[in-house]
Image: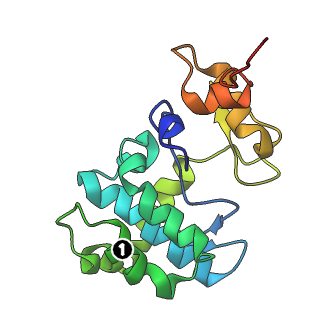
Amino acid sequence: MAKDDIYDIVDLKMVAYGNTQESDGTFTCQHGPDECTTDAMELCLQYKLSGDINSISSGDTTKAAWPFILCMEEAEGDPTKGATCYSQTMTNTTIPWTTINDCATQDFNTVQSAGAKATAPTDHTYVPWVLIDGELLDQDDTLLKQICDAYTGPAPKSCKRLMGEDQKRCYK
């Protein structure tokens, strides 16, 4: 997703939920409460960008939220970095950070429940759970190759480079 030409050809849906467990309305995240808080921030941004909680499951706001999500992931999910990541990455929105932060606390169960409904089946064994054309990608280190293989339009430069098609040769 760091390559603009790949970003342009991907229909991205990212749900911050991972291996969260829910029991009687209580959510427990695999890596502790900070992960739950950060997941809620990411889910709330997707929700608030459209004003529709269904944006979490449809993925229609994932691309718009991606810069914030990426910043939070690069900050190793530290929820104290939320305001900084938001101010650095979401400069094209009129939604104030307080709206996202308030949602993450006040609507925590609502967004976590929406995340649970939009994620992988309960029998998955790892995250991230990546699907390409509905098929599970077993090794996420082949993501670029799998995207390029699945794409049916004109190959973007990154795909050509991956396949060695953009290398110029000089023959004497």
In the displayed structure, does residue 83 sit left or right of residue 114?
Answer: left
Query: Quadrant where the C terminus lies?
Result: top right
Asked if 146 appears above or below 115 in the picture, the reply is above
Residue at image location 72% in from the left, 71% down from the top: 30
Closest to the observer: 170 or 121? 170
Residue 87 location (% of width, % of height): 32, 76
Q: Which residue is mark 1?
A: 88
Total residue callouts:
1
Residue at image location 52% in from the left, 62% down from the top: 70
Give the structural element (helix, strand or loop) at label 1: helix
Q: Could you tell me the amino acid type at mark 1? A: Gln
**How are the residues colored?**
rainbow
Closest to the observer: 164 or 152? 164
Answer yes or no: is residue 47 visible: yes
Closest to the observer: 148 or 49? 148
In the displayed structure, does residue 89 sit left or right of residue 117?
Answer: left
**Residue lying farthest front?**
172
Asked if 161 appears above or below 59 in the picture, the reply is above
**Residue lying farthest bottom?**
80
Residue 75 location (% of width, % of height): 58, 77
Residue 31 location (% of width, % of height): 71, 76
In the displayed structure, does residue 64 sit left or right of residue 138?
Answer: left
Quadrant of the image occupied by residue 107? bottom left
Residue at image location 51% in from the left, 14% down from the top: 153
Residue 38 location (% of width, % of height): 52, 74
Give the class, few, some or many, for how many residues have Cα within 10 Å of label 1's Cα (few <14, many ≥20): few
Closest to the observer: 61 or 93? 93
Residue at image location 54% in from the left, 26% down from the top: 156
Answer yes or no: is residue 134 visible: no
In the displayed structure, does residue 20 sit left or right of residue 16?
Answer: right
Asked if 153 appears above or below 142 in the picture, the reply is above
